Image (tube, rainbow, N blue to C red):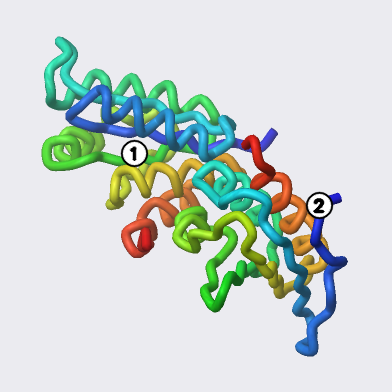
Amino acid sequence: MAATVGIVLVSHSAALAEGTAELAGQVGGGAVLIAPAGGTSDGRLGTSADKVASAVRSASSGGGGVVVLPDLGSSVLTVRALLAEGDLSGFGPVELADAPFVEGAVAAAVVAAAGGSIKDVLDAAQEARHAGKL
Amino acid sequence: MPENSEAPERAAEAGVYSATVTLSGDLHARPAGALSMAAARFSAAVLLLVEGREANAKSVLAVMQLGAASGQTVTVRATGPDAPEAVAAITQALAAATKVGD
């Protein structure tokens, strides 16, 4: 079994991260590791560095690295701070995607489920910006 | 075997193969995902063509954007070294993924 890429969804809202993970997981045929990291540790809207770090650890178990999709604002800052401080080292390559949250998660999940490399998964997430709906 | 599909046909242009499928259900998010995952296994470039619109079969978002619905005919066109196998696999995936009840 080749190494597979995991996906972390970082949102201010636990419900948003979990719901998006559920949707992307289903479109990806259930064959991809997607870890949600939403809300603060006491259940409010916000982001938690601990939740993000533990989601990255769990998503890294496929061995192919992790693509992290943040929703907005402090989600981005939280992931950037963890990367800058080296708190996400030891989990293989970790890439932060500049992508729309739902579309990027779905596109990334399909490519990860198909066995794409971390670059393929990152590109799929970031190209989602250019995909129309209509 | 999927209904309404043809054996991959070699087009006038060398290395281009295509076949058609008439959908028995809508090409929703989950079927689009199944289709894109099937397309990703091939190195051939694979296009889906529906009523003048086209999409890269390997892009789930592009496949969803096609908005292909039950009763419409989709042409699968592949170009590349494994194009015949890609057309056969993707027409089958398309028919299976849009079967009513999914």
Pick out the residue farthest to the bottom.
B12
Residue at 44 percent of width and 27 percent of height:
A59
Identify the element where label 2 is drawn: loop
The answer to whether A117 appears left or right of A97 in the picture is right
Residue A72 figure quarter: top left
Front residue of this view, candidates A4 and B49: B49
Q: Quadrant of the C terminus of chain A?
A: bottom left
Residue A68 tag number: 1
> In the rendered image, which residue does mark 2 sit on?
B2
Residue at 39 percent of width and 42 percent of height:
A105
Front residue of this view, candidates A63 and A43: A43
Q: Quadrant of the N terminus of chain A?
A: top right
Q: Chain of mark 2?
A: B
Residue at 57 percent of width and 51 percent of height:
B26
The answer to whether A55 appears left or right of B51 in the picture is left
Pick out the residue farthest to the front.
B71
Residue A44, horizontal then vertical, whole percent: 12, 17
Residue A42, horizontal then vertical, whole percent: 15, 10
Disc 2 packing (10 Å; few <14; some 14–19; many ≥20): some
Dot 2 amino acid type: Pro
Identify whether B84 is placed above or below A82: below
Residue A93 figure quarter: top left
Residue B40 figure quarter: bottom right
Residue B69, horizontal then vertical, whole percent: 56, 57
Identify the element where label 1 is drawn: strand
**How much space separates mark 1 and mark 2, taking CA atoms?**
38 Å
Disc 1 packing (10 Å; few <14; some 14–19; many ≥20): many
Front residue of this view, candidates A44 and A76: A44
Residue at 42 percent of width and 35 percent of height:
A7
